[in-house]
Image: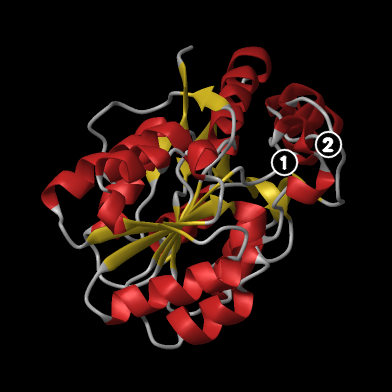
Amino acid sequence: MDTASTREYAGKKILELGATNPDLCVVGADLNKSTFTNLFAEKYPDRFFDVGIAEQNMVNIAAGLAASGKIPIVSTFAVFGSTRPMDQLRVGVAQSNLNVKVILTHAGLITGEDGISAQSLEDISLFLSLHSFSVLVPSDAYEAQAAVELAVNTPGPFYIRLSRPETPVLNHENIQLQQGGSNVMVNGSNISIFACGYMVYHAIEAAKILKEQHGISARVVNIYSLNPIDKSIIIKCAKESQFILTAEEHFKYGGLHSLISQIVAQNNPVKVLSVSMNTYAESGTSDELINKYGLNFNSIVEKVLANLS
């Protein structure tokens, strides 16, 4: 299976959009090569601002640019761009509903050997708590480009969550996303698996194993938009499935599992299981980490088999 980097493809899309949108600008925090916004900086230096290791200033500057009619992209690692400037994101961006696009890389567990301090496992819950933010978690490089295009062309604050390593390519090059959208990646009738980001690949692989080895039909939904979220597909799956399983590279509470559990509880109660993080991790390769902490297709298969009646 082909692989590609969501952060690299997002960086290329930002550069591409810069050619047709003179109001687009980027504010970075000393990690521009790693986020691939250096591509934009080289082509449009008058629209690129690096503030150094000062994430609070980065968000405040972006808010000022947005208030002046520009379309600023905030770019750094997810762990630095979510926790450090939370007050500035809340007061300076979310409460004023400013047109700031927060595009953060190196999210989740698979940050490689960067270790525990670089693993962003709370970022989705933090941005979901900021009421006016749209939250997109693309599953591959092409969805990452589509997410950037959607965010830049849609008024209001956005958060886009990207990974560090190359991940499997699941979609076609010209895919388009929509606010509150989702895509059914595998059709199934027994159970439903909702996944976002890197875990969509593992959900698809788990569905293959369940079908081929156990005769279990699992629907897989790529729920790339978390705010707004596609309530209709969640309710449909709750009505048609023995249970729902959510898979996310994030802590269980406050992320995808919490969102879907709330919607199911209010509309069509059914058991909602979770494959997610439940502890802080450690340093290691991506493969070592996802295997040790159970963020893989084998863990999904085991949880489904343990709960299927």
- Near-viewer residue (88 or 222): 88
- The answer to whether residue 28 shows anywhere in this view is yes
User: Which element carries disc 1, helix, strand or loop?
Assistant: loop
Residue for point 25% across, 70% down: 155
Q: Position of residue 62 (x, y in %)?
A: 40, 70
**Is there a contact, CB below 8 Å, between mark 2 and mark 1?**
yes
Q: Residue furthest front?
A: 46
User: Which element carries disc 2, helix, strand or loop?
Assistant: loop
Q: Position of residue 150 (x, y in %)?
A: 27, 54
Position of 278 compared to 205: left or right? right
- Residue position for label 1: 109
Residue for point 41% across, 40% down: 38
Is residue 182 shown above or below 6? Answer: below
- The answer to whether residue 190 shows anywhere in this view is no
- Near-viewer residue (276 or 272): 276
Residue for point 49% across, 44% down: 32
Residue neighbourhood size for the residue with mark 2, other residues' Cα within 10 Å, grouped as few (<14), some (14–19), many (≥20): some
Q: Quadrant of the C terminus?
A: top right
Rendering quarter of residue 293 = top right
Q: Position of residue 240 (x, y in %)?
A: 50, 49
Residue for point 80% across, 31% down: 289
- Near-viewer residue (159 or 243): 159
**What amino acid is at disc 2?**
Tyr
Number of numbered discs: 2
Nearest to N terminus: mark 2 or mark 1: 1
**What amino acid is at disc 1?**
Leu
Rendering quarter of residue 23 = bottom left
Q: Residue furthest left?
A: 20
Q: Which numbered tag is attached to residue 293?
A: 2
Q: Position of residue 184 (x, y in %)?
A: 40, 39
Rendering quarter of residue 306 = top right
- What is the spatial separation of the Cα atoms under label 2 and label 1, in whole angstroms? 9 Å
